[in-house]
Amino acid sequence: MDKKSLSLYIHIPFCKKKCKYCDFLSFGGCSIVEQREYIDALCKEIGAYSLISDEYEVVTIFFGGGTPSYVPAEYIGKVIDKVRETFTLSENAEITIEGNPDSLTSDKLKAYRSYGINRLSIGLQSTNNEMLNILGRVHNYDQFVAAYSRAREVGFSNINIDIMSGLPSESMESYVKTLGRVVEMQPEHISAYSLIVEDGTPLAEDEELLSKLPTDEIDRRQYSRTKLLLGQAEYERYEISNYAKTGYECRHNLRYWTGGEYLGVGLGASSYMKLDGGLEMKPSVYDEYNVGEDEYNIGEMTDNDAVYVRFKGVDNIDEYIGRFSKYGSGWTDVSSVKELIGNCYTEIQVLKDKDRMEEFMFLGLRCIKGVSISTFEERFGKSIHDVYGKVIEKYSELGYLGVDGDNIYLSDKGIDVSNTIMAEFLL
Ligand code: SF4
């Protein structure tokens, strides 16, 4: 039997300290004991997938967070060992770890290489120390330069650097300096996102900083400058906010954007899987944790038909550890993956064709080459024009969408208003 490809996202929710703008599921300053308990539970969760692991070949792994480089390297090694023990890992799998400059020591970097990690993603955000301070980052620019050169020394030949535009009170000159310094270092990949003010973060409460945020117009100018300067330095923009040297596009993220199956393990991690045997819920579990059945949005249940399911790990760390540390020795024993998912996860949603078509469009349109007309037809048995003809026609005439052979893509003008256009693909 041909194995299906699977991408694995592994969430490590620990950081040295929370950044001011961060609403990711992560905690600052957790003890080593808490970290170890979490890693043990995580390994149990991965092991639970031996129920279906022979159907899959893992083609990408992404350690995200949080700050995966904050935890002891051997914890990461333990998790990778568990993945190898449970799944077949493709020989040329892309294995990425995210890290912050202050915690990427030589020893850790060497250990990562010995575990087979072949891609490093460093959270820099800005080369301007004043900006790093405003954001509440725990590192400075010099620490980044040192960490980057250590990573090269130990043999990392595929490095991403994260940078951020739209920072409070940052001049264009300062932003361009960040771009220039990053390009000088010649990483293989650059992610350039705009700062988003998320509710509930310290930044969202800081009136003074909020008053210094750039206008949309300046934000757009920073975006164009990013595109221009990175383009001149031969980075190809292959997704709205992601740039790569030829052949170094992030394979893991491309699978998200093109509708590949992925399994997210760890606290609050999301998954998207095709289950050949449907889903099955065990009501006793609701009682155990006092959650009502209606908290689970199961949509239309099928017994044996293949279903596309989206589901999420619980986001309370004590509950997560309690749930999976007992796996294999108590109430969580299950005999099939449909029970495992039905029992141990939250926000379970069975996707209908309509949901999958919408996602195909708005995730695919994030990619600069756009969505494939023939893939849409193969996947859904319908012509893209029968489903979205009117929207495609309207925005093509206005110059927001372009068609190139088999592909429909957002034009530069379309990217500027991408949220509005993507919303039109909701059915
Ligand atoms: S390092 Fe990343 S995950 Fe951790 S607090 Fe900062 S932005 Fe959030």
Image (cartoon, rainbow, N blue to C red):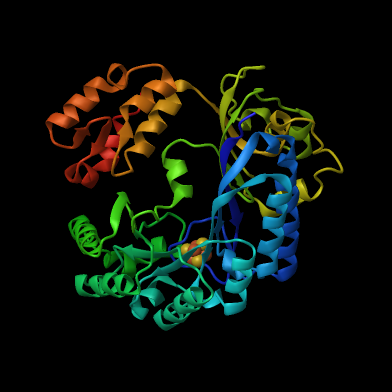
Q: Position of residue 16 (x, y in %)?
A: 57, 72
State the image quarter where residue 294 is shown: top right
Whether residue 330 is visible to the viewer of this picture, yes or no, is yes
Quadrant containing the N terminus in the rendered view: top right
Indicate the quadrant where residue 2 lies. Answer: top right
State the image coordinates of residue 52 (x, y, percent, origin top left).
70, 34
Provide residue 381's location: percent of width, then percent of height.
41, 16
Q: Of all residues shown, which one is farthest toward the right?
A: 329
Please give left or right for residue 37 compared with residue 208 in the image: right
Q: Quadrant of the C terminus?
A: top left
The residue shown at (56%, 38%) is: 5
Residue 309, above or below 34: above
Front-most of residues 112 and 270: 112
From the viewer's side, name the closer residue of 183 and 423. Answer: 183
Please name the residue shown 24% across and 65% down the image: 233
Give the image quarter of residue 14: bottom right
- Residue 415 drawn above or below residue 98: above
Figure disc tally: 0
